[in-house]
Amino acid sequence: MSNQSILKLAIQKSGRLYEDSVGLLKSCSIGVSNGGGRLRTVASNFPLEVYFLRDDDIPQYVEDGVADCGIVGENVLFEKNKKVQIEEPLGFGKCRLSLAMPKARNYEGVQGLRGARIATSYPHLLGQFLKQNKVDAEIHEISGSVEIAPGIGLADCICDLVSTGSTLISNGLKEVEVLLRSEAVMVSNQHLDFPKRQLLDKLLFRIRAVRKAKNNKYILLNAPNDRIEDIKKILPGMKSPTVLPLAEPGWSSVHSVVQEDHFWDIIEDLQAIGAQGILVVPIEKMIV
Ligand code: PRT
Ligand code: ZN
């Protein structure tokens, strides 16, 4: 019975996804400590057991049901090609899997890759891409430091992860083709029993509330009463904005929620129609 009442989550043991994975749980009020490099730990404040693994192993563990769910990059997930369910994008670990070649070389499109030697840690995804484009090329699988392969004469080009692009630049390479855009996702075993499914849904509910809150801001401003109607049009709010009278006659305070993406445009519009004393505050959790 106790087996069924705890959800087993696999996250990266250390590396680029570790901090954000633990941070996400923390923002859902779930505490995790990996003290002493342990393989697993029981989280506080949620029936959750956390397994710390290499990211490459996470899809297999989840497919086999050793872990019920896991946090892993789509790049690894699609490369490993395991049978797991994608539950939710998590908005971190963003990168792209790209083809790059020495910057002095002329890129003649995908067809120009015919016969090329391409170094990569992603043979499956690269193979798929070449097949889709009906291009025969040599795939050289290497596990690390792929970006140095052209410089040492091991390959003509590479297929590797890129985020800022600075690794490519410092190795004299240019990005010529994007194969995949990736971010960390929550994946789950395809055969979760009902109690575990319920626990995972509860965890996903919290994750969505936290992520939604991050993408939104709470805004407060003062405005003359004759401008309120115009301001309402700019600030839709979750239902509609809250309007409260100020002590000063003829003035009101307006409260609403705005999306981070539209934020600066909205502020400019609000100032233009007479809003004053604009305050913007972060939202911790948002349940809609
Ligand atoms: O030990 P373990 O196997 O768990 O870790 P790892 O070394 O395989 O992975 P790690 O920690 O490097 O990355 C984990 C995951 O982070 C990846 O699978 C991606 O989903 C995601 N991610 C996001 C990245 C990058 N951005 C990234 N830039 N993973 C690797 N890189 C590398 C890339 O390979 C290249 O060497 O960073 C370099 C390029 O970075 P820029 O910024 O110079 O372009
Ligand atoms: Zn790895």
Image: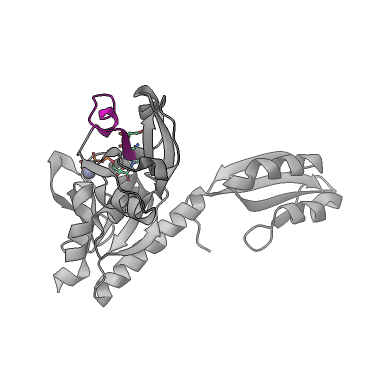
Say how many tags the image has: 0
Residue 99 point in image, percent of width and height: 37, 40
Q: Can residue 277 be seen by looking at this rendering?
A: yes
Q: In this view, does 147 lie above or below 214?
A: above
Q: Can residue 25 be seen by looking at this rendering?
A: no
Q: Nearer the viewer, residue 96 or 200?
A: 96
Q: In this view, does 201 lie above or below 171?
A: below
Q: Nearer the viewer, residue 197 or 132?
A: 132
Q: In this view, does 50 lie above or below 14?
A: below
Split into 4 quadrants, where in the image is the N terminus? Answer: bottom left
Which residues, given as a range, are shown in magenta?
A: 145-160
Q: Is residue 15 above or below residue 288?
A: above
Residue 147 on the magenta segment: yes
Residue at 50% of width from left, 61% of height from top? 287
Q: Nearer the viewer, residue 252 or 136?
A: 136
Residue 111 point in image, percent of width and height: 41, 45
Residue 130 on the magenta segment: no
Residue 52 point in image, percent of width and height: 19, 49
Q: Which of 217 and 183 is in front in this view?
A: 183
Res 197 → quadrant = bottom left
Viewed as shown, does residue 137 lie left or right of 39? Answer: right
Residue at 73% of width from left, 55% of height from top? 243
Residue at 24% of width from left, 55% of height from top? 80
Q: Which residue lies furthest to the bottom in this view?
A: 194
Viewed as shown, does residue 228 lie left or right of 127? Answer: right
